[in-house]
Image (tube, rainbow, N blue to C red):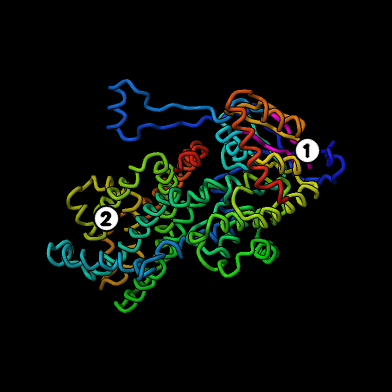
Amino acid sequence: MATGVEERPVRIVDAPLAPPAENLGLLSVFKRRYLLKLLVQREISGRYSNSMLGVFWSYINPLTQFLVYWLFMGKIMGADHGMDNYPVHLFAGLVIVHFFTETFGAGTRSLLGNKGLLKKMAMPKEMFPVASMLVSLYHLVPAALILLVVCVFSGWQPSWETIPSLLLALGIVMALGTALALIFSLANVFFRDFGSVVNIVTNYIRFGVPMMYPFSMIQDALGDKSWIYLLNPIADAVLLFQQAFWVGVTPNPEATATKHLPENLWVFGLVAFGASLVILVIAQLIFSKHENKIPERLT
Amino acid sequence: MSADSIVVDGVTKNFTLRYHRSIKDITVAKIKGQAVSNTFKALDDISFTIKQGESVGLMGLNGSGKSTLLKLISGVMRPDQGVVKTRGQIAGLIATGAGFHPQLSGRENIFLNAAIYGLSEDETAAIYDDVVRFAELGDHLNSPVGNYSSGQYSRLGFSVAVHIDSDIFLADEVLAVGDKPFKKKCMEKMEEIRDSGRTVVYVSHAAGSVKRMCDRVICLEKGRLVFDGDVDEGIEYLHYGEDDAKGSAKLKQLEAADSALGAEV
């Protein structure tokens, strides 16, 4: 042969012999922040591409929901129970609930929506559910700012609990949202049915959290057993949001907190956060076990 | 002799073919006694070792498992049994196209593609001009990749892949699309890669280009490794391995591919 191996220079590769594209799951995702950043940017510009109103849909959706709930639930059906500043209660709940449902929904579609990349390139597949969560977090910012402005104009009195409550609520939703996005995006690759399950869960979430009605209504209905309601991490996150924003805009915050918030909200909040982290670890284990079947199932 | 670059040891990959997906379909099939699904071995107990700096041609008919093998080497897929190990950075094209996002522009896709290979923003910026020049896409670079022709699409993918400083370069039927001047350019670029001491795995049906590029040939047939050795013998094996009509069809295919390419390059 004209060109033998020996005739050419051989590059010395200073790397171990290892399985290609070794994946440490979520750890790899955070090691490769630049790629994650590009995917998040792509998702932000891509989610509303070819739509006239573009990113405004991110505001229109929660805003119209707000109007419908405020009008029908609050005014007509009387779910506001004569609460002080009911619109803030409703909107604060909507902001955090929308963050969760958007993460869940977009995360579930994330693997299927990126099959062009996944079938050809080796990369940590967890990138896509995580990117969906971060995009939803990005969309939360303007809504949270509106909420902040509304609070300030309603005579808001923040307390020491405001910032920790806000962070804990976000932590719960980020961890649980990512966990569910991982599992459901994976399941959705194998059976498209899971995309529909998301809609059902989303509906239940909207009614299963103290957003349209006060938590005191649940206490009246369940009495001693109202802790069952608090097993839902999203309900805890919403209550923490109420503690951060709504309680401070009522005329008598202390009385409001006593009446409308559970006694051990911090305990429930921290337990919910811990449980969400455990669920996230389990989700990662399930994802790692089945992810190698993803490329061949993406058709 | 140089160090091992790619080690494939006892690798098997099964694919599940699903006939039925919904519960209704599955129930009906069960009642009728039909198979609900069946698996087939895309790769069956494949073992070989490629040394750093070797240039290996991977040949076989369509559906013989070449692209699946390349996907296992690149890490897109994992083997069901056996081990694949590689050393260093891998770049290349799988099944004629790169992984691009149709909504993003060519420019944005270059950065995304390079980031998937593990390049930083600065590293990508450093090769960006070369990538653009090589791809020769002109103004199309700012329009979404979804509007590209298949030729333009593979140009861009190939251009990104060859400008990554990889230790292992995978090329899967890169010359199947693209016009003749570009094919020539691709061949030259791949020879440059090979001559710089990088490992090359080259999938092609064109015996001429394999002869020119490679110093070893691995042949697959229905997921099995049927030949591993000298280039001329390997091509011979594919030509005359079977002396029935199938064999001569194979021969014709190879010759046609050659005439499409060989005259040019």
Whether residue B151 is visible here, answered yes or no, is yes
Furthest residue toward left? A76
Is residue B115 in view from this perspective?
A: no
| Residue pointed to by mark 1 | B215
Task: Classify the position of the C terminus of chain A by image quarter.
Answer: top left
Amino acid at dot 2: Arg
Residue nearest the observer in this picture, A104 or B203 = B203
**The residue stretch that appears in magenta:** B48-60
| B102 displayed left or right of B265 | left
Q: Nearer the viewer, mark 2 or mark 1?
A: 1
Q: Chain of mark 2?
A: A
| Residue to which mark 2 is pinned | A206
Where is A64 relative to B23, above or below? below
Picture quadrant of residue A58: bottom left
Residue flagged by tag 1: what amino acid is it? Asp
Give the secondary structure at mark 1. Answer: loop
Q: Label 1 neighbourhood size at 10 Å, few (<14), some (14-19), many (20+)?
A: many
Question: Quadrant where the N terminus of chain A lies?
Answer: top right
Main SS of the magenta part reads strand
